[in-house]
Image (tube, helix red, strand yellow):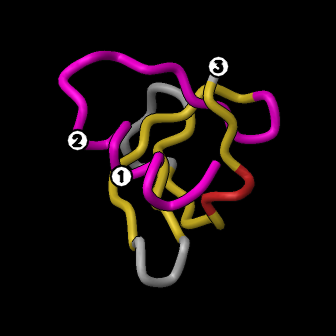
Amino acid sequence: MNAQRAAEIFSSKDTIEVELEGQPVWIENVDEANGMATVQIGAKPTNTKTVSVERLKEH
């Protein structure tokens, strides 16, 4: 996925399924300038990771 699409998903009112290496994630923040996104992995709010948006897959 590219940074623009990640930002669109983050801003969307709809629930759009996104995965990181097969695990469902929620996009918490997108840094379009650097192509990075902070995602929440699973249901635990403290389980976050900052990754390249290229690693995210829209389901």
Q: Is residue 48 magenta?
A: no
Q: Which residue is mark 2?
A: 11
Q: Position of residue 6 (x, y in %)?
A: 46, 49
Is 27 on the left-hand or right-hand side of 54? left
The quarter of the picture where residue 25 lies is top right
The quarter of the picture where residue 27 lies is top left
Is 47 on the left-hand or right-hand side of 54? left
Amino acid type indicated by mark 3: His
Is 50 on the left-hand or right-hand side of 10? right
The crowd level at tag 3 (other Cα within 10 Å; few <14, some 14-19, many 20+) is: few
Quarter of the image where the C terminus is located: top right
Position of residue 6 relative to residue 17, above or below, is below
Q: Which residue is mark 1?
A: 7
The crowd level at tag 1 (other Cα within 10 Å; few <14, some 14-19, many 20+) is: some
Tell me if label 1 and label 2 are in contact, CB under 8 Å. Answer: yes
Position of residue 44 relative to residue 5, above or below, is above
Amino acid type indicated by mark 2: Ser
N-terminal-most mark, 1 or 3: 1
Q: Which residue is mark 3?
A: 59
**SS label for mark 2:** helix
Q: Position of residue 56 (x, y in %)?
A: 66, 45
User: Real-space Cα distance between discs 1 and 2?
Assistant: 6 Å
Amino acid type indicated by mark 1: Ala
